[in-house]
């Protein structure tokens, strides 16, 4: 599972993806305050 963690001023949002390509496309929509990680 691919996870995007978005850090905002006072919030943290997490989005889950099963496909790496889909996660990479979604990551491009966020600002520099996002991290892509892989979890088993």
Image: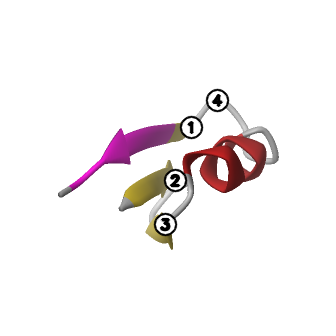
- Contact flag, marks 3 and 1 (Cβ < 8 Å): no
Q: How many C-alpha atoms fall within 10 Å of the one at disc 3: few (<14), some, or many (≥20)?
A: few
Residue that sits furthest to the top in the current view: 32
Query: Element type at marker 4?
Result: loop
The region drawn magenta spans 35-39
Q: How many C-alpha atoms fall within 10 Å of the one at disc 2: few (<14), some, or many (≥20)?
A: some
Which badge, 1 or 2, comes first in the chain's sequence?
A: 2
Task: Identify which residue is drawn at 46% across, 38% down.
Answer: 35
Which residue, given by chain and number where applicable, does mark 4 sit on? 32
Cα–Cα gap, marks 2 and 4: 9 Å
Which residue, given by chain and number where applicable, does mark 3 sit on? 18
Answer whether residue 12 is magenta in the image: no
Seen in the image, is 3 located left or right of residue 30? left
Q: Position of residue 1 (x, y in %)?
A: 36, 62
Q: Position of residue 22 (x, y in %)?
A: 69, 55
Which badge, 4 or 3, comes first in the chain's sequence?
A: 3
């Amino acid at each position: 599972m691919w996870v995007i963690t978005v850090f905002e001023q006072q919030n943290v949002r997490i989005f889950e993806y099963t496909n790496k390509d889909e996660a990479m496309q979604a990551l491009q929509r966020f600002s520099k305050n996002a991290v892509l990680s892989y979890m088993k």
